Amino acid sequence: MSANFTFETVKHIRNEWGISKQHASAFFGTSLAPTLTSLGIDTVILSGVSTSGCIRASCVDANAHGFIPIIPREAVGDRHPAPHEANLFDMNAKYGDVVSEAETIDYLNGLKK
């Protein structure tokens, strides 16, 4: 992996919901887009692997559904640095915002509760 994260650091929140997906995109063939829309959510933060597969597909589909995708650089990874960096560059140029972990935390801290 070309990212420094472990799944052990992910903590589940009480009453948190999730989706099951069969394809690369979290949006394709799932109820994610209408669920987020019904909740008034307009921005998604993407994390996981692989940058060139599931993250990119979800980023493109999030954008196509009218959401603003945020991709924290430290929260995604791929098998090799070359496709990882190329896809981060392309997603940032066309579909979403590739930002640092610190910028993501600042964004979340600035949300109204």
Image (spheres, helix red, strand yellow):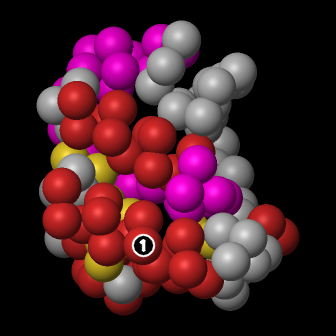
Q: Residue furthest right?
A: 8
Write the residue at 42% across / 73% down. Answer: 86
Image coordinates for residue 55, horizontal then vertical, percent: 51, 51
- Could you say where residue 72 lies in the image, as x and y percent from the top left? 42, 72
Q: Circle 1 — which element?
A: helix
Quarter holding residue 90:
bottom left
Q: Is residue 75 visible?
A: no
Q: Quadrant of the C terminus?
A: bottom left
The kind of residue on which mark 1 rests is Ala
Q: Is 82 or 39 nearer to us in this picture?
A: 82
Asked if the stretch drawn in magenta spans residue 17, the answer is no
- Residue 22 position in % (x across, y down): 70, 21
Residue under the point 66% across and 58% down: 49
Residue 4 figure quarter: bottom right
Q: Could you tell whether 7 is left or right of 59 in the image?
A: right
Mark 1 — residue? 86
What's drawn in magenta, residue-wise?
30-53
Residue 49 in view in this figure: yes
Residue at 27% x, 16% y: name it: 38
